[in-house]
Amino acid sequence: MTAPTPYESIGGEDGIRRLVDRFYDLMDTAPEAVHVRALHATSLKASREKLFLYLSYWTGGPQTYVERNGHPMLRARHLPFKITSLEKDEWLWCMDRALDEHDMPEATREALRQRLHPLADHMRNTPDP
């Protein structure tokens, strides 16, 4: 028997969708996320779908993101947006809370954090003021 993928541990499609929805609900309402929210369109519908597809792929689920968009090239896709430590920290604030609230094994939560924090830091493309 093989260990479940993070995708399976998070709850598959439904679990990833709940995680992404909670993440964007926080971003859309929390004063702690005002700067990162400002980088997004008024409607978060497209952002929700892209993150859902990306996290599904990234955690070992369906490859739909790559089939539709090609290689993620996350840094290149984020270059049009000015991302400093402030926006990165706000993004992580939302994601950490969404992870904390999501029902999953603690080992999965921590493994995701250990991968997401450096990834978010890699998205910084503008010096801090």
Image (spheres, rainbow, N blue to C red):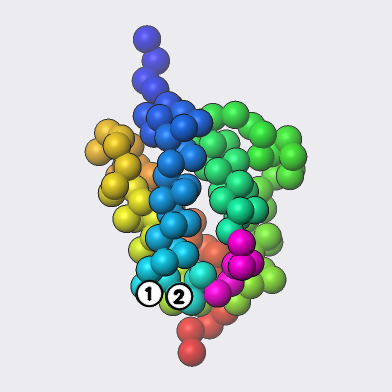
**In the rendered image, the vertical position of residue 118 relative to residue 40, given as above or below:** above
Q: Nearer the viewer, residue 88 or 127?
A: 88
Give the mark count.
Answer: 2
- Residue at 63% in and 67% down: 41
| Residue found at x 39% / y 15% | 2
Q: In which quarter of the image is residue 11?
A: top left
Horizontal placement of 34 versus 39: left or right? Answer: left
Question: Residue 68: x and y, percent?
Answer: 74, 39
Mark 2 lies on residue: 34
Which residue extends farthest top? 1
Residue depicted at x 51% and y 70%: 37
Q: Tell me, yes or no, whether the highlighted magenta stretch contains residue 102.
A: no
Q: What residue type is labelled 2?
A: Val
Q: Is mark 1 on a helix, strand or loop?
A: helix
Q: How far apart are marks 2 and 1 (CA)?
A: 5 Å
Q: Where is residue 9 in the image (x, y as percent from the top left)?
A: 37, 29
Above or below, 11 against 52 in this view is above
Q: Taking the image as drawn, is residue 65 in sight? A: yes
Residue at image location 55% in from the left, 43% down from the top: 52
Q: Residue 31 carries which label?
A: 1
Residue 115, x across and y down, in percent:
42, 49
C-beta proximity under 8 Å, tags 2 and 1: yes
Answer few, some or many: residues within 10 Å of disc 2's Cα (few below 14, many 20 plus, some between 14 and 19). some
Q: Position of 109 compared to 91: left or right?
A: left
Labelled disc at residue 102: none
How would you classify the magenta stretch by its main secondary structure? loop
Which residue range is magenta in the image? Answer: 38-43
